[in-house]
Image: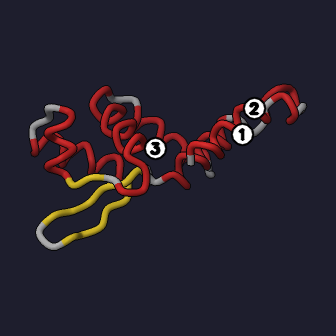
Amino acid sequence: MEKKNALAALSALGHDQRLEIFRHLVKLGPKGAVAGDIAAALSSLPNTLSANLSVLSQAGLVESEREGRHIRYRADMNTMQSLLGFLMEDCCGGDASLCVPAFDALKRCC
């Protein structure tokens, strides 16, 4: 992941509601949710949710797919893995074995 992409993702997640939306989508896994269900689950106004989903999408953290009249949203796990990899790229003073537990936990969830 390039630095500018990491900054865009971190900036998008640096907002309370967007972080909440992203974490909710991560919990739902590959099935994701339609916007109305996300709004109901998070007690969010539809227009606010739409704006926040747009920011998350532009940062590459959320992907969407049209299903008839609805749009289904999912957390983009590849981007999340890339972001975490970028953040941990030079961790532990170059001793990658110290980072293995963190990477193993990520592999189990995604």
> What numbered label is drawn on residue 104?
1
Residue at 62% x, 51% y is 2
How many residues crowd mark 1 within 10 Å: few (<14), some (14–19), many (20+)?
Answer: few
Instruction: Determine which residue is flagged by label 3.
Output: 8
Q: Where is residue 86 in the image (x, y as percent from the top left)?
A: 66, 42
Q: In this view, does 90 lie above or below 29?
A: above
> How far across and down, in percent of the image, does residue 74 sit?
37, 54
Query: Circle 3: is it few (<14), some (14-19), or many (20+) Cα within 10 Å?
Result: some
Q: What residue type is labelled 1?
A: Asp
SS under mark 2: helix
* Marks 3/2: CA–CA distance: 27 Å
The three-letter amino acid code for the residue at tag 3 is Ala
Q: Is mark 1 on a helix, strand or loop?
A: helix
| Depth check, front residue: 106 or 83 | 106
Q: How far apart are marks 2 and 1 (CA)?
A: 5 Å
Q: Quadrant of residue 34?
A: bottom left
What whole-number distance in Å separates the C-alpha atoms at marks 1 and 3?
25 Å
Dot 3 lies on which element?
helix
Label 2 neighbour load within 10 Å: few <14, some 14-19, many 20+:
few
In the drawing, does residue 38 fall left or right of residue 19?
left
**Residue 24 image-quadrant placement:** top left
Residue 19 in picture, x, y percent from top left: 36, 33
